[in-house]
């Protein structure tokens, strides 16, 4: 048990205090100090840390500071919270690593889950502006309209603006129009230009989402590749037809 908890960061004196709290139940802090044999300041410091992690509860009763361990199943929530936090920061850590190595980072994801992974990766990082080509016919199938609406709402929440180019031949509905409130500007390609694959440029990364036929997602992290794709995008953007803002 000690080794397992150590892998979650509950090690050393922190483990001793946590175990004592579980074994003793609802008791004054002095009991925990006696059980562990640790200095008072060390126990109080560990209890503060455990309380911040949601593993114990503390309160004052009858003039004494009391402590009680929460139901151990909260450890699962503890693990999930750490996993979520790591998932959010991992793209930035990868970017730093590959920049230091001086080489591009290419990630390939298969299936519908892969399309969603590439799509949501485009919201990572600190780039405030995004350039996108949306193949509506494919996006409405995978990942689907509700998933895209959720993605759009999160993009707005993070205050990331997006320029979007679509081809009318690939459109399926009059939605996702230009909007000041939603930080989105939409243009349509000339009739002779059909863009049949979705991609998003953000910072030094490009996320690509295939058609439902091949069904994959890919993220390419490369300063040179992103620069080239952005230059190509500007050429497409300049030839595309502006649309009216709905607000």
Image: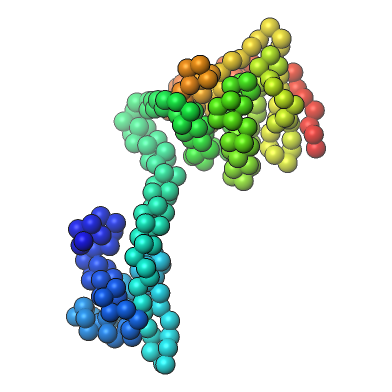
| Vertical placement of residue 30 versus 113, above or below | below
Please report the residue visible at 34 percent of the width from the left and 65 percent of the height from the top. Answer: 72
Of residues 128 and 244, the one nearer the viewer is 244
Along the horizontal axis of the image, is 93 left or right of 190?
left
* Residue 242 visible in image: yes
Quadrant housing the N terminus: bottom left
Image position, residue 7 (x, y; %): 25, 55
Of residues 104 and 31, the one nearer the viewer is 31
Check the image and tell me how it is coloured. Answer: rainbow
Image position, residue 70 (x, y; %): 38, 70
Looking at the image, how many numbered discs can be counted on the residues? 0
Along the horizontal axis of the image, is 161 left or right of 214?
right
The quarter of the picture where residue 79 lies is bottom left
Of residues 180 and 197, the one nearer the viewer is 197
Along the horizontal axis of the image, is 151 left or right of 115?
right
| Vertical placement of residue 214 versus 47, above or below | above
Please report the residue visible at 46 percent of the width from the left and 31 percent of the height from the top. Answer: 113
Quadrant housing the C terminus: top right
| Vertical placement of residue 93 versus 35, above or below | above
| Residue farthest along the top direction in this orientation | 192
Along the horizontal axis of the image, is 146 left or right of 101?
right
The quarter of the picture where residue 236 lies is top right
The quarter of the picture where residue 3 lies is bottom left
| Vertical placement of residue 87 versus 111, above or below | below
* Residue 133 visible in image: no
Please report the residue visible at 68 percent of the width from the left and 14 percent of the height from the top. Answer: 169
Image position, residue 130 (x, y; %): 59, 31
Of residues 6 and 205, the one nearer the viewer is 6
């Amino acid at each position: 048990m000690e080794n397992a908890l150590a892998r979650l960061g509950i090690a050393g004196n922190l483990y001793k205090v946590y175990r004592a709290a579980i074994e003793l139940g609802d008791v004054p802090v002095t009991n925990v100090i006696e059980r562990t044999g640790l200095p008072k300041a060390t126990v109080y410091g560990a209890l503060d840390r455990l309380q911040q992690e949601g593993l114990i509860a503390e309160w004052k009763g009858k003039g004494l500071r009391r402590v009680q361990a929460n139901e151990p199943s909260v450890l699962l929530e503890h693990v999930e919270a750490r996993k979520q936090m790591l998932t959010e920061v991992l793209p930035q850590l990868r970017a730093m690593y590959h920049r230091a190595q001086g080489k591009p980072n290419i990630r390939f994801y298969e299936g519908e889950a892969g399309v969603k992974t590439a799509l949501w990766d485009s919201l990572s990082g600190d780039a405030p502006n995004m350039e996108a080509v949306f193949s509506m016919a494919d996006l409405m199938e995978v990942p689907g309209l509700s998933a895209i609406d959720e993605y759009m709402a999160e993009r707005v929440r993070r205050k990331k603006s997006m320029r979007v180019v679509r081809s009318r031949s690939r459109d399926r509905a009059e939605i996702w129009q230009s909007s000041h409130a939603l930080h989105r500007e939409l243009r349509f390609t000339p009739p002779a230009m059909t863009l049949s694959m979705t991609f998003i440029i953000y910072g030094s990364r490009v996320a690509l989402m295939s058609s439902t036929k091949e069904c994959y997602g890919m993220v390419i992290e490369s300063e040179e590749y992103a620069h080239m794709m952005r230059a190509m995008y500007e050429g497409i953007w300049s030839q595309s037809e502006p649309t009216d803002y709905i607000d």
